[in-house]
Each structure stands twice: as structure tokens, then as C-alpha cells.
Image: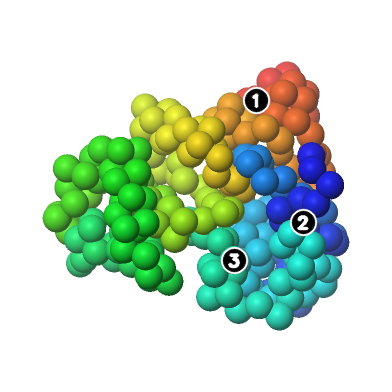
Amino acid sequence: MTATPLLELKQLGVRYGNIWAVRQLNLSIASGECVALLGSNGAGKSSTLRAISRLLPAAEGQILWANKCLSSFRTESTVRLGISHCPEGRRVLAKQTVLANLELGAWLRRNKKAIKIDLDYCYQLFPRLAERRLQLAGSLSGGEQQMLAIARALMAKPNLLLLDEPSLGLAPLLVDELMQCLAKLNKDGLTMLLVEQNVYAALAIAQRGYVLEAGELVLEGTAQELRKNSNLRRSYLGDE
Ligand code: ATP
């Protein structure tokens, strides 16, 4: 871990009205890391991502980006900093083409040459999107729409990619394919915070992980430590 993390959550609290979704969360991500944020339904994972990208206010605590506090930032400013959020449920524009969806991801960028380089990178990473670039996004399969959602987030040229349940609803073979793509992105230098219920798939590519339960941090460690953790194995693999 470097002295200054790229992103740091300090005692973060997020709530909806009187209901706390996340409490006193401390988490950090160094540049170049892939960090998994794990936990079952309703544990507070999506709320954490929404607070980082400022879709939700932090009710308490701090969100620091390279030591700078994001409290007063709007979502657009976090995108300018390089935080790109790929939300749960894909949310592609069904009536627009694959290409138009990808171009939308680059809406804040002006350098056409650099945008084209990133478009080619996405097509190389997800060849099926290249084949279907003029097809309407709504006609893609679930797995392809997930790839499009990730590629669209990449078109913002992020410094940090927030991924919310990318494997949700995908067949096991597609989950493997997707995880390999995410591993390649991380190997190419992209920093990622990966929210997953598919704990072992996430720990196969992440270097470290945090486990939330009912909004509170219950476990953290290297991926290797977490894979061996007997509580986690009992909860997610059904080990005795
Ligand atoms: P899931 O994988 O099911 O999305 P999660 O770990 O991402 O789970 P969150 O979606 O962050 O969990 O939810 C954390 C808590 O906040 C839950 O108790 C949930 O019911 C509550 N919550 C989430 N969104 C809202 C909302 N818009 N209004 C009120 N409560 C909410």
C-alpha cells in the first residue's frame, strides 16, 4: 500500500432517511489495486459505491480522493476526477446503438483521437461489441449488455472503476469470461472497486477485499486470507 491511497473512506456513514445502510466504514484503495467489496443482499455495497460517486450524500465520515475531500463534489465532478461508476442492472440505452452507448461514455472528453484509441481498446477487450456496434443495445443478450455497460464506463477513461455486481444474472461460463476481462483491465493498470455477491469469482481477481454485513465491516484482508477464512467459506460456500 502506498503512503497516500487513491481513495479512502474514513468512518463513512450512508443512510436513507432514518435507516442506516452503511456505518463507520473504513476502506482504502491504492492506485493499481483491484479491491473486492463483498457481502450478501442489503449489506450496503451499492450504497457505498453511490456515496463514492456522490449519487448519495455521506451522512457522516469522509471520502478522500488522493487526500482531497469529496464532500462538496457533485457526481459530474467525480467523473472529471476519473471515477467511473458502472451501476447494477446494466442500464444501457436500449434504443441506441452499441456505438452510441459507447460514445455517451466519453461525453466529458474532447480529444477525438484519444477517444478512438479507447474505443478500439474496448472492441479488442469485448470483440462481440465490435461485431454488434451498429446493433441496438436492447437487442443484445444480458451478458453482452453487461459488457457494453462496462465498456461505456471505460470510455470515460477512468482512474477508478466502480463495478456493481457485474456478474449478476450471467451464466457461469460468461461469468468466467467477464472476470478474465476484468483481470486484464486491472493488469493493464486500471484501479477497481468490485462489488460482488459472487465472492470467490471476485477474490480470484482482487488483491484485497472487505466484507460488509448489515452495513458494517466484519472482515478485511488479502484475497488469499479471505479465500481461506472459515466464516466466509461457511457463509458463501456452505462449508461445515
Ligand atoms: P444488493 O446486492 O441487494 O443491492 P447491497 O449490499 O448493495 O445489496 P444496498 O443496496 O446498499 O445493499 O442496501 C443497503 C440497505 O439500504 C438495505 O437495507 C436496503 O434496503 C437499504 N436501501 C437501499 N436503497 C434504498 C433506498 N433507495 N431507500 C431506502 N432504503 C434503501
Residue kind at label 1, given as amino acid type? Gly
According to the picture, the residue beneath numbered tag 3 turns out to be: 81
Residue 209: % across, % down: 71, 38
Task: Give residue 153's quadrant in the image.
Answer: bottom left
Q: Residues within 10 Å of mark 2 (few under 14, many from 20)?
A: many
Q: From this viewpoint, is residue 142 visible?
A: no
- The residue closer to the viewer here, 96 or 122, is 122
Residue 106: % across, % down: 38, 64
> Which residue is located at x 74 percent, y 42 percent?
210
Q: Is residue 143 left or right of residue 131?
A: right
Residue kind at label 2, given as amino acid type? Glu
Q: Give the CA separation, mark 3 to mark 1.
A: 41 Å
Q: From this viewpoint, is residue 101 visible?
A: yes
Q: Is residue 169 left or right of residue 112?
A: right
- The residue closer to the viewer here, 162 or 202, is 162
According to the picture, the residue beneath numbered tag 1 turns out to be: 238
